[in-house]
DNA sequence: CTGAAAGCGCTTACAG
DNA sequence: CTGAAAGCGCTTACAG
């Protein structure tokens, strides 16, 4: 039961001596009232501390001026930055934005998506990070007003906004190649994701363009987190000829790699060069400052909200241009050493992670 | 208008040949039906892809099994970590958690808080980061079911959960003192905040306990962000006798200080020792790895949700014990040099920030 | 222009 | 045990 204290539109109407209809219309600006009447309503609203019940409004109107953002992991800094920018833009456009943390669980994503059906939100920005088993496409295609952000769900009929993954990966790879590296490794996220596919694809192309082959030992796919970065590093470290450079296709992976280097005494960049992707806040303060492909979270959030609101308003949404990327050169890349770095003795004993599947 | 496709409880009732009442009660588990009847309902639900409209339910029930979390800045890593932990615990207890980014704007906090009034959420975890002008206390005291997390709003009648700020600050300060520092500075957030007051208070006490005085030149209050850290550093750097150690009462401040050191060529810890507060993810990878007071975001999120749900259920909430803290020693603290570090010539020209108010 | 009334999709006292 | 009906607090066709 509602608290008995909250006053309703009926109370206001009664206090102002007009009908509920009139109060509603006046409050929604659909009517122009004589100054005297509108003043009576204003006074009643103030006196009763009346605040329209948003739930009731939604039920009858079917819309809420609210948009949702489903994020797979709010503690991933790049995602949090997108969320923050999205909120700011939504607010600017008169919407409120609510965020849902799905922890990358498909069932939660579906549940949050259902909020479109009952007008809890008018639309949703979906940032997923796992392959779809079909349920997601189905859901997206039955509820309108979702836009896919950062990762794709293949088959979904919805506007999309992605980064320029291919260009970013090419920039990173060529930067390494330009420094003379030939033994360069790739660390990716879940292989089924668009970002992984595109970044790996461009990595491969960049090598090919220089008549180089991808060495399967130098490719690792995991999750987009520090642990996977560490796992990748340890696998590479166990090789007879470890790579001299790594393209970590997400900064969190690079952080895990750095972690591994620190533990095993490998110096970056003199033993091993490293470039990241995302360029999250403060990577310039790492040891060493990380060279990384920058993508603008601000642009991501802002444009995604714009797309969604246009979509809600029924506009035809053209394919969105990718979010721009650029390489930020700092100090984690140097020319390769003459000799490969090798771990002393059994430094790796017991540290090797289980193998992960390739692409 | 709702999409015509969404089916309602009436459709289900009709298809199953029972009343709406029966369907509702059955779906809410308030009734035990003959297997045959419940099977008919199940079939109807499946066939019509019926999903209860949560908005309608809220309007009639007045509750939503949803809790809200208002965070002043979701891109602040420590807050994002709390949010993440809170979501997990809420989910475990059968609630869904929605997050609101207030950008530390009081009006937004008030607006989000109002969602308790219309049952959009059953209760709210409030993380604010600015002094209250009175509106917040009033709001909190008129809507039940809010718990204050991380920072206080004085005068509010609500359960609270704070870190052990005093102990944390003491640990940090004594660590510096134990290394022989006497010229130790304090950098705080907004001086009106509980965390600032408590951390500064304990800093002061720790000095006093060793018969040391706080040097007003060594105290700086700003915001809890990198910029303020940088500002503080630059002010200290302009002093004739700069401090040999800084207690940055938030990691983001420490990051700004590190930024300043890098720009001006000051070495940490040999020129300047530094300890942070929060111990956010990956500060072990900084240059140098940051010594910091650790507070558990996981514990914060988990316990805050527990408190709130107990509160919603009408339990009497005793004063919560503070969230534990501990000092994590890494490599940003060393013994002070014999001589004070000084900047060469006019290295600071044009870089000095405007003065900020003291406590 | 104004208002009485129906309706949004549920839940739940109340009566049978 | 079951169901018809009222009610949650709004909005909005519809009639006056």
Image: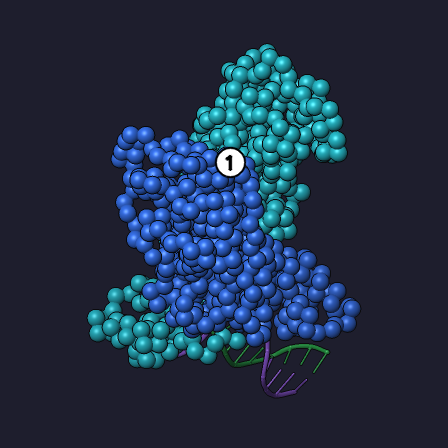
Chain colours: A cyan, B blue, C purple, D green
Image position of A231 (left or right of A61): right
Which x, y percent locates residue B6? 57, 58
Tell me if mark 1 has few (under 14), some (14-19) or many (20+) residues whose alpha carbon lies within 10 angstroms of its own.
Answer: many
Q: Residue at x 43, y 78 (%)?
A: A5
**Percent x, y for residue A322?**
46, 32
Residue at 40% across, 76% down: A7
Q: Is residue A116 visible?
A: no
Residue at 36 percent across and 63 percent down: it is B132
Q: Which secondary structure, mark 1?
A: loop
Q: On the picture, is A133 further left or further right than B193?
A: right
Front-lying residue, A331 or A317: A331
- What residue occupies the far right of the structure in this picture? B35
Which residue bears the numbered disc 1?
B288
- Name the quadrant of the C terminus of chain B: bottom left
The percent position of residue B177, horizontal first and vertical second, equals: 48, 48
Is residue B312 left or right of A133 when viewed as pictured?
Answer: left
Question: In which chain is the residue bearing label 1?
Answer: B
User: Residue B343: percent from the left, percent from the top?
Assistant: 34, 33
């Amino acid at each position: 039961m509602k608290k008995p204290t909250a006053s309703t539109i009926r109370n206001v109407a009664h206090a102002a001596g007009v009908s509920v209809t009139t109060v509603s219309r006046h409050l929604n600006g659909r009517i122009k009232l004589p100054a005297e009447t509108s003043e009576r309503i204003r006074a009643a609203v103030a006196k009763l501390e009346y605040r329209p019940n948003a739930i009731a409004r939604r039920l009858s109107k079917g819309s809420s001026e609210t948009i949702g953002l489903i994020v797979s992991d709010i503690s991933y800094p790049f995602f949090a930055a997108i969320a923050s920018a999205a909120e700011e833009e939504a607010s600017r456009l008169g919407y409120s934005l609510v965020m849902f943390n799905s922890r990358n669980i498909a069932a939660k994503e579906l549940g949050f998506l259902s909020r479109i059906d009952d007008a809890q939100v008018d639309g949703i920005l979906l940032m997923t990070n796992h392959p779809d088993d079909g349920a997601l496409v189905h859901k997206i295609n039955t509820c309108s007003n979702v836009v896919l952000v950062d990762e794709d769900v293949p088959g979904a009929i919805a506007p999309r906004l992605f980064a320029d993954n291919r260009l970013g990966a090419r920039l990173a790879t060529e930067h390494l190649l330009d420094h003379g590296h030939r033994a360069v490794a790739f660390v990716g996220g879940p292989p089924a994701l668009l970002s992984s596919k595109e970044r790996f694809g461009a990595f491969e192309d960049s090598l090919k363009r220089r008549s180089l082959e991808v060495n399967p030992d130098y490719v690792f796919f995991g999750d987009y987190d520090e642990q996977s970065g560490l796992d990748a590093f340890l696998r590479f470290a166990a090789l007879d000829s470890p790579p001299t450079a790594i393209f970590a296709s997400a900064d969190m992976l690079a952080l895990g790699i750095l972690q591994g280097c620190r533990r095993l005494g490998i110096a970056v960049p003199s033993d091993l060069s490293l470039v990241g992707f995302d360029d999250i806040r403060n990577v310039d303060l790492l040891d060493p400052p990380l060279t990384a492909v920058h993508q603008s979270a601000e642009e991501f959030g802002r444009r995604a909200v714009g797309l969604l609101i246009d979509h809600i308003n029924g506009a035809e949404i053209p394919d969105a241009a990718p979010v721009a990327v650029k390489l930020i050169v700092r100090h984690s890349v140097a020319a390769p050493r003459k000799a490969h770095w090798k771990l002393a003795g059994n430094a790796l004993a017991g540290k090797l992670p289980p193998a992960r599947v390739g692409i």
